[in-house]
């Protein structure tokens, strides 16, 4: 597999034959003019800002000087691709409104801006001289040694190598050239190490991995919330369309078939109409169950407490209910708890052999706590496909936790805890 950064390339035998030594040299070389440029920009901004501040013209210039690190860091993020193929994300947020004022106001308040300013000052005062020094010693010195025979040929008599050692003959000149070749071989590795360390410092200051990871986690959490909300909205829309459309048509069809059956004389036609009416009623029943499974109207209209009471009333196993969570909650959380209870009571009916179940819902300390208990045989295991894994996944989507205690012999206790606040002032 092709190395994606200079560190991986250094660890492989084909480093010298690859483009990575050249990329490292170009990275360090381009850092020198950029460092000089930001030094001049910072110095000019401060000097002209102070001088012109007496006539108030320089005050905006001084105020904008801290933002000089922003374009410099943008260039640096592009330059980092020479050393590491992984992109260095821009941590700046997009302004809510267009215009320089909105942009500058947002940037001044961001931590990333001040990290980039610190990196710009560090580059202007320290890093570019170090880059120049590294290139001089790691590339300049070996190349000068390798050029000893050519320099001796140009002078004709003698030449000083590195301004220190005097060479008067070609044997010594070629000896120094060979030494320069060996040093160049070693210097290419040192160049990669220096460039890699320089790039890591830049990434640490302008695009730290922990901050990037935190931003990505926050973005994923926000996108997950948006997806859940969109999914719940779509479920409600489908439920309304089926309830107000297909269900009403089936009701009308059933009534029409019933009236036609009453008007028809006894015989085969009446029997056919009776069978058709029965099929329409069966389809209507199935459609109502489907609508209930997509998104119950009682949950939308009357809230979580009423919806859970409805589920308990329809359970084959008697259920004792205690609900102290008043008010309304976010739609995604209400939907998740509704379907958890529905699936849990279905499991009680199908698998537990229980004679009774208990449902408790409380809201305290900013947390909804749901508990479903039965007096069945126990032994519920998520690995055996009882739907518990799906319930845990559904709860985790709304940042909740699901735990199950089900020793052999019972009882089985399913506990769900979801941090949330009531969206209803009365709750």
Image (cartoon, rainbow, N blue to C red):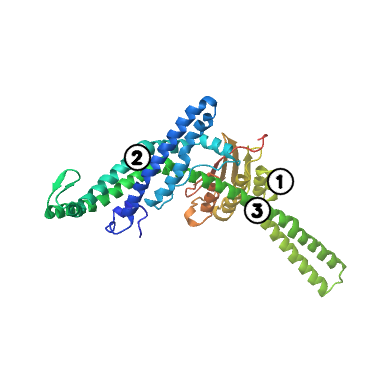
For marks 1 and 2, give the one nearer the viewer. 2
Label 3 secondary element: helix
Secondary structure type for disc 2: helix
Mark 2 Cα-neighbour bin, 10 Å: few <14, some 14–19, many ≥20: some
* N-term mark: 3 or 1: 3
Do we see residue 257 in this rendering? yes
Residue most extreme to the top: 54
Rendered view: 364 above or below 386:
above
Residue 340 visible from this viewpoint: no
User: What residue is at 55 percent from the left and 35 percent from the top?
Assistant: 105
Q: Residue at x 72, y 56 (%)?
A: 241
Q: Between residues 419 and 133, which one lies in front from this camera angle?
A: 133
Residue at 23% x, 47% y is 141
Q: Residue at x 46, y 35 (%)?
A: 114
Q: Which mark is residue 301?
A: 1
Q: Is residue 255 left or right of residue 289?
A: right
Q: CA distance from mark 1 to mark 2?
A: 65 Å
Q: Secondary structure at mark 1?
A: helix
Give the CA distance from mark 3 to mark 1.
Answer: 16 Å
Left or right placement of residue 173 versus residue 387 in this view: left
Tell me where residue 251 appears, x and y as whole percent: 78, 60
Q: Mark 1 or 2 closer to N-term?
A: 2
Q: Label 3, on which residue?
A: 234
In the rendered image of this protein, does residue 364 appear above or below residue 393?
above
Which circle marks residue 318 in the picture?
none
Q: Nearer the viewer, residue 133 or 220?
A: 133
Q: Residues within 10 Å of mark 1 (few under 14, many from 20)?
A: few
| Residue 175 point in image, percent of width and height | 14, 53
285 over 65 or under it: above or below: below
Q: CA distance from mark 3 to mark 2?
A: 55 Å
In which image quadrant can residue 371 be found?
A: top right
Q: Which mark is residue 127?
A: 2
């Amino acid at each position: 597999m092709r190395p994606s950064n200079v560190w991986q390339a250094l660890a492989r035998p084909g480093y010298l034959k690859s483009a990575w030594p050249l990329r490292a040299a170009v990275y360090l070389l381009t850092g020198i003019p950029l460092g000089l440029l930001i030094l001049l920009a910072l110095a000019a901004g401060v000097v002209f800002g102070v001088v012109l501040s007496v006539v108030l013209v320089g005050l905006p210039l001084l105020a904008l000087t801290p933002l000089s690190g922003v374009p410099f860091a943008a260039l640096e993020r592009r330059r980092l691709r020479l050393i590491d193929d992984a992109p260095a994300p821009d941590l700046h947020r997009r302004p809510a409104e267009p215009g320089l004022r909105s942009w500058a106001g947002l940037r001044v308040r961001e931590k990333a801006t001040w990290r980039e300013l610190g990196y710009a000052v560090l580059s202007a005062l320290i890093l570019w001289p170090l880059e120049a020094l590294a290139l001089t010693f790691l590339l300049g010195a070996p190349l000068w040694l390798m050029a000893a025979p050519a320099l001796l040929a140009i002078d004709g008599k003698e030449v000083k190598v590195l301004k220190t050692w005097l060479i008067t003959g070609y044997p010594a000149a070629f000896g120094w050239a060979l030494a320069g070749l060996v040093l160049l071989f070693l210097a290419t590795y040192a160049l990669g190490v220096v460039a890699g360390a320089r790039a890591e410092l830049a990434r640490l200051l302008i695009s730290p991995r922990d901050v990037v990871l935190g931003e990505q986690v926050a973005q994923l959490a926000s996108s997950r919330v948006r997806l859940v909300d969109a999914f719940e909205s779509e479920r409600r829309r489908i439920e309304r369309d089926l309830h107000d459309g297909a269900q009403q048509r089936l009701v009308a069809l059933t009534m029409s078939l019933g009236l036609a059956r009453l008007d028809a004389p006894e015989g085969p036609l009446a029997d056919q109409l009776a069978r058709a009416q029965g099929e329409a009623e069966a389809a209507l029943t199935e459609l109502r169950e489907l609508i209930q499974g997509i998104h119950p109207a009682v949950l939308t209209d009357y809230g979580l407490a009423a919806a859970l009471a409805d589920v308990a009333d329809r359970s084959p196993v008697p259920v004792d209910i205690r609900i102290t969570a008043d008010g309304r909650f976010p739609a995604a959380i209400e939907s998740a708890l509704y379907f958890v209870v529905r699936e849990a009571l279905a499991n009680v009916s199908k698998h537990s052999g229980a004679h009774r179940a208990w449902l408790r819902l409380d809201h305290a300390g900013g947390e909804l706590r749901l508990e479903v208990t039965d007096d069945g045989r126990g032994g519920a295991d998520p690995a055996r496909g009882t739907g518990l894994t799906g319930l845990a996944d559904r709860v985790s989507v709304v940042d909740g936790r699901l735990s199950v205690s089900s020793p052999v012999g019972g009882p089985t206790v399913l506990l769900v805890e979801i941090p949330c606040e009531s969206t209803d002032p009365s709750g």
